[in-house]
Amino acid sequence: MKLIIGLGNPGKEYENTRHNIGFRTIDFLIKKIGFDDFKEKKKFKASITQGEIDGEKIILAKPFTYMNLSGESAILMMNFYKLKPEDVWVVCDDLDFPSGIFKIRLKGGPGSHNGLKSISELIGSNDYPRFRIGIEARNLKNTPREAKDFVLGRFSPEEKTVIEKIIPKVVDSIIFAIKRSLGDAMNKYN
């Protein structure tokens, strides 16, 4: 069983912000694999859907705790499903990579990402895989220099074009990792 969590902030005001690329990726994933729509599960502080890929149970989740409290939702689901950190895959934005780049990591520190910090603190481990999607484009004109303002901002038209091409690649890498392995996916997509 795998729990795949897309990180973001709930609510219309955050819908198309850079910080919500995890939500957007998970939304694209459910369309590609044909899972049912998300249903709100208050006991998990998340909206979830589930199904199977190649005989493995897959749970997709979008926490509604807001980014900085993502760990609250992650630990509730982890405990309920009795999962190990390596069975919890996280999809999130990454300010350290340029737009159009994504990396699969088996584990590692959260860096400056508050959603990952929350997850690491509450599950007591950094040993969970993550699909980090680059959003760095602060070299563009009229872009805020403060990280908080930047991640909560919307994609420019140039960025949108790049992001619309990268999300399907991330989704393909997730499906490939489920069917084969994370190591194989890292070799193919990193």
Image: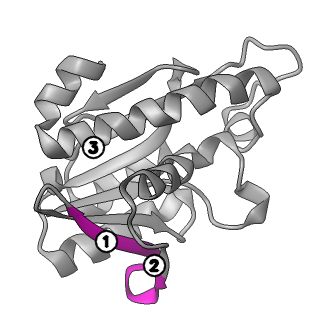
Residue 69 x %, y %: 48, 64
Reply above or below: 99 against 27: above
Q: Quadrant of residue 132?
A: top left
Q: Main secondary structure of the magenta part?
A: strand
Reply above or below: 147 against 92: above
Horizontal placement of 92 versus 58: left or right? right
- The region drawn magenta spans 40-52
Q: Earlier in the sequence, mark 3 or mark 2?
A: 2
User: Can you identify the residue that label 2 sits on?
Assistant: 45
Residue 175 — which label? Answer: 3
Q: Magenta stretch containing residue 44, yes or no?
A: yes
- Amino acid at pointer 1: Gln
Figure quadrant of the N terminus: bottom left
- Amino acid at pointer 3: Ile
Residue 50 — which label? Answer: 1
Q: Residues within 10 Å of mark 2 (few under 14, many from 20)?
A: many
Q: Magenta stretch containing residue 117, yes or no?
A: no
Q: Quadrant of residue 71?
A: bottom left
CA–CA distance in space, label 2 to label 1: 16 Å
Residue that appears at 69% across and 25% down = 161
